[in-house]
Amino acid sequence: MRYHVSRRAFLGGAASLALGGPALAAAPQTSLRPQARVKRSAAERVIAASGLSGEVAYAVGDASTGEILETVGGEVGLPPASVAKALTALYAMAALGPDHRYETRLIADGRIEDGVLHGNLILAGGSDPTLDTEALAQMAKQLRESGLREVRGVFKVYNGALPHTRSIDPDQPDHLGYSPAVSGIALNYNRVHFEWKRGLKGYAVTMDARTKNYRPQVSMARMQVVNRRMPVYTYEEAARLDKWTVASQALGNGGARWLPVRKPAHYAGDVFQTLARVNGIVLGKVNVTQARTGGAILVRHESKPLVDILRGMLKYSNNLTAEMVGMSATSALYGRPASLPASAKSMSEWAAETYGMQNTLMVDHSGLGDGSRMAPEDLVRALVAAQKVDELQPLLKRFAMRDSEGRENRAHPIRVAAKTGTLNFVSALGGYATGADGRDLAFAIFTADMEKRGKIARADREVPPGARAWNRRSRRLQQKLIERWSALYGS
């Protein structure tokens, strides 16, 4: 049974509805018109009881048959936040295949005689979003083991496999690590580790590319401690540098955080220079190129299979991974995109053609930009199609239902595999719910208060007042809806 509740009708009737009341245990066995009216009242009570401002839209369907069982504003596009990554995963799997591996190479552009390269050495990025310092260290070691001792030419870093984007979402504050730059090469998810400690003569600061076994210092990202209270951070772009300042009055005695990298090729080149020097190979300054260069491949590094990368992306909701796999999928299907938004548009067109997602238009692949719009019914169609080939559900994180005190209830009879999405005053959830009777439902729930979100000052976008409480209310509503559907539509 399918029905719609308009936002206007809900606002007009919500004030007269009780805030409590049990959900219906089964569909009423009466005519279609009374049945729709009873269900609408129950849906309104659940939404009204949440106390959530803004828009609520959702759709739920049978994951096996595709029948849409219930929808409120199901054709209305709202920001999907990180739920968008579920669509990106399907896009990448279709374009590249689950076994695809990204390759980063060291290329010799010139002849090698007696361990001396009479030409250029190129670190060529291959769009691998998971490349880290550990991998570069192994590549430097393998370069030494190949017999290379000296490079007489230029050290280049190729980043042209994907278009360069300074920030995934330029509306985010400069210092937020989840909105770094994107290009054809990335390192440590394009984040640099900033650490500070107060000493007798002020603060000692470090900027490094740390991983489990390595902590190479970085020279292309520089931090200056300035005697002020606000702003906490400032960023200035220089020709070869990311230049930061931080307010001394905000630091306390010590701490650390990851900052975004705006020059990924310089960052990767800087770190590889250090690791190569440890292996006895001295390289010149980093020269960034977007031109493909031929030559002998000296070292290759392969990523894990794409299916494993996507599982990690969905679990940890990494934005850079979503953008790089999304753009590499576009490259495989349609050729190298002109920009990140152009690639997102290509994914939207693919989704419309593949799944009938006519009311979905993305501005990126991660859901970070609030200009993206996705309709709940659109996503449910994609989820149903993916379920038929068991493509997406195995990659999704298990979503724990909670008890009345907000604690995880692992004994809860409803099992959920889903992707969450959270922005300030935007919360979304999409995936699959399996009730105690074993029936699988596919669902999408989008909530957003764009009026409140639009009033947030740029400097306050990390943790604006009221956002956390709003998002908590949305998550409670999501669980109430899932519990209601399981009771109402269980076999």
Image (cartoon, helix red, strand yellow):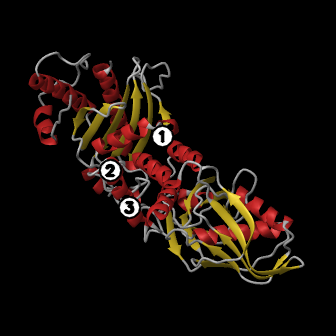
Badge 3 vs badge 2, beta-carbon distance below 8 Å: no
Question: What is the spatial separation of the Cα atoms under label 1 and label 3, in whole angstroms?
Answer: 21 Å
Given residues 262 and 129, the one toward you in this image is 129
Question: In what quadrant of the picture does the C terminus appear?
Answer: top left
What amino acid does circle 1 point to?
A: Glu
The residue that disc 1 covers is 391
Circle 3 residues within 10 Å: few <14, some 14–19, many ≥20: many
Question: What is the spatial separation of the Cα atoms under label 2 and label 1, in whole angstroms?
Answer: 24 Å
Given residues 176 and 23, the one toward you in this image is 23
What amino acid does circle 2 point to?
A: Pro
Does 478 appear above or below 199? above
Label 2 SS? loop
Question: What is the spatial separation of the Cα atoms under label 3 and label 2, in whole angstroms?
Answer: 18 Å
The residue that disc 2 covers is 79
Residue 336 location in percent, x, y? 47, 69
What amino acid does circle 3 point to?
A: Ser
Residue sitting at x 57%, y 80%? 239
Does 437 appear above or below 136? above
Circle 2 residues within 10 Å: few <14, some 14–19, many ≥20: many
Instruction: Quadrant for residue 431, please give it.
Output: top left
Say which mark, if any, is on residue 346: 3
Residue 82 location in percent, x, y? 42, 48
Residue 237 location in percent, x, y? 52, 75
Mark 3 or mark 2: which comes first in sequence? 2
Does 178 appear above or below 201? above
Given residues 476 and 317, the one toward you in this image is 317
Instruction: Quadrant for residue 376, please give it.
Output: top left
Mark 1 or mark 3: which comes first in sequence? 3
